[in-house]
Amino acid sequence: MNQHAERTAVQVRQGAVAPPNFDAYIPLDTDTVADRLSAYSAVAGQLGGAPADWRVREVGDGNLNFVYIVEGPEGSVCAKQALPYVRLVGESWPLPLSRAFYEHAALIRQAEDAGQDAVPEVHIHDGPQALTVMENLAGHVIWRGALIERQRHDTAAIVLGRFCADTLFRSSDLALDPALKKREVALFSGNDALCRISEDLIFTDPYHDHEMNAVTPGTEDAVAEMRADTVWRVAIQEWKWAFMTRSESMLHGDLHSGSVMVTPPGGGERVRVIDPEFAFYGPMGFDLGAVLANLWLNAGAQPGWGEGWQDQQNWVLDQGGRFWDAFAARFTDLWRTERRGEAMVDRVLRDADEAALEAMLARIQNDALGFAGAKMARRIVGLAGVADLRTIPEMDARAACEIRALRLVGHLVKEAAAIGSVAAATDMARDLLRPRGAAT
Amino acid sequence: MNQHAERTAVQVRQGAVAPPNFDAYIPLDTDTVADRLSAYSAVAGQLGGAPADWRVREVGDGNLNFVYIVEGPEGSVCAKQALPYVRLVGESWPLPLSRAFYEHAALIRQAEDAGQDAVPEVHIHDGPQALTVMENLAGHVIWRGALIERQRHDTAAIVLGRFCADTLFRSSDLALDPALKKREVALFSGNDALCRISEDLIFTDPYHDHEMNAVTPGTEDAVAEMRADTVWRVAIQEWKWAFMTRSESMLHGDLHSGSVMVTPPGGGERVRVIDPEFAFYGPMGFDLGAVLANLWLNAGAQPGWGEGWQDQQNWVLDQGGRFWDAFAARFTDLWRTERRGEAMVDRVLRDADEAALEAMLARIQNDALGFAGAKMARRIVGLAGVADLRTIPEMDARAACEIRALRLVGHLVKEAAAIGSVAAATDMARDLLRPRGAAT
């Protein structure tokens, strides 16, 4: 039994059990960050010098929060503060500060379950200020941007597959004592406002004429076809039911390629997962589907980015298979060595243990395909479309890419069980995501 | 929109949000009950007269608690107090007093969702004493006993079907605002000790050589066959996974025929559901399966009770079908009139609404069959076997009944999806639960 397993076996889960009171909350801006951070001795020590020497930049390119990089004579940190509203939309869309609490709770659990290397290290979390000061991932860029630039990070898919296996397995009834797992479910059930965003933006709004959708000119017919398809609409509501009711594991909850940071590709490249503010207990396949969806969206966008698209599309599609294989291999390893929860217990399974593993991986794979489809559609039709598609300069090319991607989505959402594997879905994607007449 | 729907729409759920402190807890006995109850004016008023006039009887025939009937000059009440251990086993098996809190929380929700007639009315709940004083169901008997005596309550199956639809639908994401539903999940997640009993006794212990199992002499081979069957063991662990991870609805959690009380059969017969201390958020099919399981166990026991068994067995088996049909009809009605949650939303489903209902009922029915099998096996092989079988006087006849019932269980647990309907399972039960050579 490794040290991790010992710890989970004795039920250690760190941190507070409920969000704090936010009455004393004061939002920061670039002028006030240095002064605030100087109050945290651990942070001041990290930066060195005096607050007047610190350089502060706001770098948040996400949709929800403000993020500051603070550089001092001896080091740098990243300070992330939640706002009482959605940054992308403004004060008209309020969003609770408690998301900073859940993000911190998830960050420390992910570090525990997947290793400190997997996520930014937390220096301090100031609960009432909805503020987390953490390691500045200097030298890292957002993976989505790197993918759009056709950089090839060969380890990213594998690191993410292992990350998913570690976090999903170790937070589930396969690993945790059932009383502790139920307490964890209860803890994250308070993150309902962030869940509601997913419930609306992924599973609901794209399927009717909602004001926040953004339909690319030229794709109207494909979108109308999707919305006219009764099988599709029943299926998406069934995936929503699964999302809302299946408390299997602590999910990252928003594991797209914009939540992954990487150093330059090649020897020694590093991969980190950030921004788990959507964390909650849901179906394992949801996080897996998010990774697959964002790879397939990028693959689908490649023809829109001109010459060389085939080679890059093939590379990106291969990453989906490598991601799943890394997940399955690591999950298998954990199944065989750390299955100390009360689900799938060895005293019942005994020699049927590998058969049960196979059945579970098949179920998770099926879910991953369906959720991948759901996540793709949302990024094509809904609010917050992906840059991979939205920044294709030629509108006709962009529309053609989106229409092809939507065709893949239909199969994934409606026929996940029949497709049956990431490998089969990858073949399907290779076929559907290229312009008609182009060779694979 | 009826009044109920209005209330759930504005998110009213009564009662405290966490169990109290039990430091001041004092267990009652028949000598101290009257004095204690005299302190609650609502109860004293109900009984009339002075405590010295009150007659106290302990009547608990369940496995967990003490239950007192208190009769005064003007009326009577039922006082139920949790003990810090399992009554059936003794102080060696501790069990938290908080189960009284969850039972009360469930009772008031069931009254809200299914009507006050469905459950005993609560007069007072004394949280720190783990004590609930409620309506005395005078003139009622436990349905299991009535079934063993071959009484025929024609409305019981129908009342229970409606009860399940009302409580399961109205506590789910089909009806509740998602934030409220998540709070409800969190609330009941504290009832982990009672969930653990189900996890162990239903899904684990019967499948290995556990000291608390009670295997009837003569059934050893059938039990050994069950435990040798790898498909069976994988399947039961998959049902356990569903039980542990699928937070669909607030379940009663122990809805066997001993949790149902009835007045004498015939015109005006009344049916009440009691004892929801196992309440938690789980899969809808679990409560439905519990009802079916206990009907099928009784049907399976009939040949052991001699002459007239065929007619009674047929009647009992018919009740399973009537129960499911009543559930499905009521669920359909609620689906069409009270679907105000964020699952299966009308703005997406639109004209696919009935197709989605059909798919959901099929899924619930499938689950009900699998859980029925799981619940049956537990009552044949495990701790707390059912009186229907255990009191058959002839040991050979009893063993024969149990072996036949176990054969049905195997089909239910392993092939629920293939069987597909309660009607088909009933036909199967009619075939498998009669002695070889006997006509149906």
Image (cartoon, coloured by chain):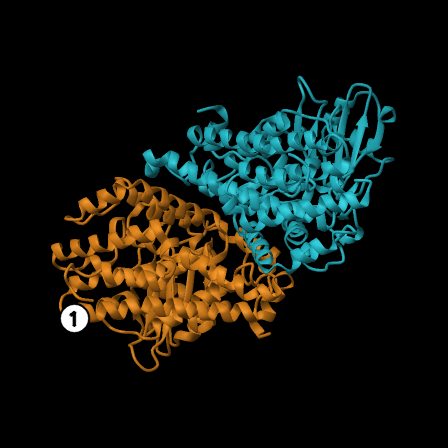
Chain colours: A orange, B cyan
Residue drawn at (83%, 31%) of the image: B34
Name the quarter where the N terminus of chain A is drawn: bottom right
Q: Is residue A382 left or right of residue B114?
A: left
Residue drawn at (37%, 73%) of the image: A50
- Which residue is nearer to you in this view: A35 or B73? B73
Residue at far top of view: B267
Name the quarter where the C terminus of chain A is drawn: bottom left
Q: Position of residue A25 (x, y in %)?
A: 42, 53
- Is residue B206 visible in the rendered image? The answer is yes
Q: Is residue B287 left or right of residue B91?
A: left
- Which residue is nearer to you in this view: A43 or B388? B388
- Which residue is nearer to you in this view: A144 or A131? A144
Q: Chain of mark 1?
A: A
Residue at far front of view: B437
Q: Is residue A158 left or right of residue B6?
A: left
The residue that disc 1 covers is A308
Q: Position of residue B184 (x, y in %)?
A: 54, 42
Quarter of image, res A391? bottom left
Q: Could you tell me the amino acid type at mark 1?
A: Gly
Q: Position of residue A204 (x, y in %)?
A: 34, 43
